[in-house]
Structures are given as C-alpha cells and as structure tokens.
Image (cartoon, helix red, strand yellow):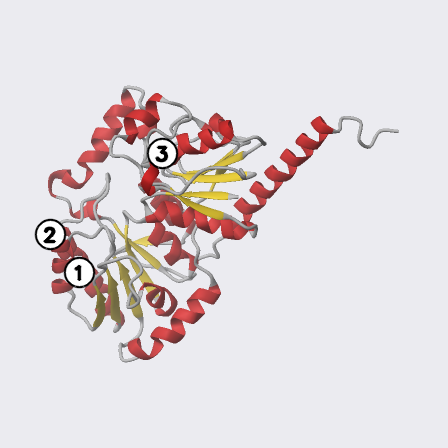
Amino acid sequence: MWVLAGQRAGDNTQSSALAEALGWPYETKRVVYRQTELISNLAFDASLLGRVRSRSDPLEPPWPDLVISTGRRSEPVARWIRRRADRSVTLVHVGRPWRGVGAFDLVVVTPQYPIAAGPCVVQNPLPMHRLTQARLAAAAETWRTRLEHLPRPRIALLAGGNSELFTLDERIAAALARDASALAREAGGSLLVTTSARTPTASADALFTGIAVPSENYRWDRPGATDNPYLGFLALADAFIVTGDSISMLAEACATGRPVHIFDPGRHAANGSADFSAGLRRRFQNFGLARLGRDLRRIHDGLLSRGSAVMLGDPFEGNPPAMRDYLSDTAARVRRLLVAEVQNVNSRLYPLAGST
C-alpha cells in the first residue's frame, strides 16, 4: 500500500490516519509539485508532469495493491500508477475529486463538498484524524504539571487562519480574544491558546494581546516543534473554542467528547468582507462550475444539528453525544473493496475454481 503525501498537512493526516486504521504495511510516497502543476494536471488524466522528480520519492516497481491519495494534485499521480502497474491497483481518494467520482474505486468526502452519495462514495461528518486515547494520555502526562496552575475549567482556543470562507485579520482576531475571554471569565476558568501554521503574524499578535484571563499561550512557528502543546491542550482542556476555518482542529476537538464552541469570523466581518470569496465561488457555481462548491458551513451545520458543537456565544446545554467511529467504518469499507478485488482477480485467473 502506498500513501501519496503532498504539501498540505491536513491532507497527509487524513491519508495516514486511514492507512494506520487499515493495519497493513504501507509506504509514504512524498510528492513535490511544480508551481504549474494545475495546468498539466487538468490537461492530462494520468501523468507525472506536475511532479518535481528530483525532489519526490521514486514511483517504481514493485507496485502496490492500494494507493491512497488526497487532494487535487495527487489525482493524476494515482491514476498514472494504476496505468503503469503490471497488476490491479485499487485507488482510494480522500476529498473532492476533480476528475469525478468514477475515476476512483472509492472516494471519501466530508459535507463541505456537494458530492452525492453513491456505491463508491463514503460520506464522513468530519475529516479523519490520528488522535487516539493513547496519544492523549501520553500528552496529558507531559503537560499536566505545566498547566495545573491555571484555574478550571480550562478552555482550549485553537486558532486557524484565512480561508476561502473566512478572514482572520487583526480586528477579527481581537474579537475572538474578547469573546473567548468572556466565556472563560464567566466560567471562572482560563484559556489554553494556540495558533497554527495558517495564522497570520499580525492576527496572532492581536489575539494574544486581547486575552484578558489567565492563559497559556503558544505561537506556532514550525512543524514538529517539541514544545508544541497542541496535544496537551486537547488532552487537558475541559472545553474548546475552534475557529470555523479549520475542520481538522474541529474534528480533533470533537473527538475528545467535550463541548466545542465554533467561532465564525464571518459574524464579525465588516460589510461581509470575510465572505467575499465564498460569494464569488457561489457565482461561479451558477455558471455550472460545481467543483468550486466548497462550503465549510455545511460541516458546522452538521455539528450544530447533532449537538456536538455550538456557535461561540450560544449556550452549550447537556453533554455532546458520542461521535461515531467513522475512521473504523471507512477502513472497513476499504477492506471490503480489496477483498472484492482479490475475489474478482481470482475468478478471472481461475474461472473453474470451486466447480465439480
């Protein structure tokens, strides 16, 4: 099994999570793409033209039985592998496929993409993630002493950044700090604040400056930093505030089973500026460009309707319902797919097997 890894950490996390859930040996194939990859990838169905060969892992025999791809850039690469291989290769794609669902054996999507249900489509409420009870327990042991001076409830504030739907500028970051501080102050608690790779520097400054309650603050600066308390915050927080742009952080916060408050930057946008891109995309949809239809609010609406989250400022009543184990469900679908493929191959090779 191969996992095609690209430049987006969220995409790589989903693919790796699925591969680990399958429990089979796998290789991660890192692929670096050219700046012009969009042109070649849209022009050719199965191609490596968008890849920087010298900076990417080699793609050569022995070929895998299964390839897991994520994101638009990896699609032509996955199809090239199947076309080049001397054996049957099953393709599983995570996210919206630009070439259509039929180009893959299985497509795993979340509600922000308007993709209809079908026999080769798995629809999950949130992105897949690698968060486990064992990882949370280990992080809790590491960070408990450092955070024990902060009054409870401790509310983790997980800040993302700009996206096509939301703008986290300095003014909105200050509003987030104000609203989060108000929630913690009313509860008599504190905040565990962390930015992310997508948080603009000026916005992070405004966020930290605006925090007006006891807090532990962390400014993200590089991947893999050993002092990053993100897992510790997930393990030890009593509740969460997550900016609505980051569905990966929403998924991990909801996985803890504790209350989650979604901060919608659009509520604080002057003249709707935070939603300009979304409005533009919806206009494109009117011209038939449905592939541009990505709306994170569909994720939010699903969480709100199930009682898994509320919008920041709204009361959280009761306890969040248990989140179904959609990662295990997805892995089971992939296993059935591989079993069916093996049976299909065997029936072609040995058409009289089992006959008398």
Residue beneath disc 2? 171
- Residue 72's tag is 3
Residue 317 spot, x, y in % from top left: 37, 60
Name the amino acid type tagged 1: Ala
Residue 150 spot, x, y in % from top left: 26, 76
- Is there any visible trace of residue 194 in the rendered image? yes
Which badge, 2 or 3, is on the more N-terminal residue? 3
Which badge, 1 or 2, is on the more N-terminal residue? 2
- Residue 177's tag is 1
Name the amino acid type tagged 2: Arg
- For image coordinates 22% across by 43% down, the residue present is 166
Q: What whole-number distance in Å separates the C-alpha atoms at marks 1 and 2? A: 10 Å
Q: Nearer the viewer, mark 2 or mark 3?
A: 3
> Which quadrant of the structure image shows residue 299?
top left
Residue 315 spot, x, y in % from top left: 31, 58
Q: Nearer the viewer, mark 3 or mark 1?
A: 3
Q: Residues within 10 Å of mark 1 (few under 14, many from 20)?
A: many
Q: Are marks 3 and 1 in contact (CB under 8 Å)?
A: no
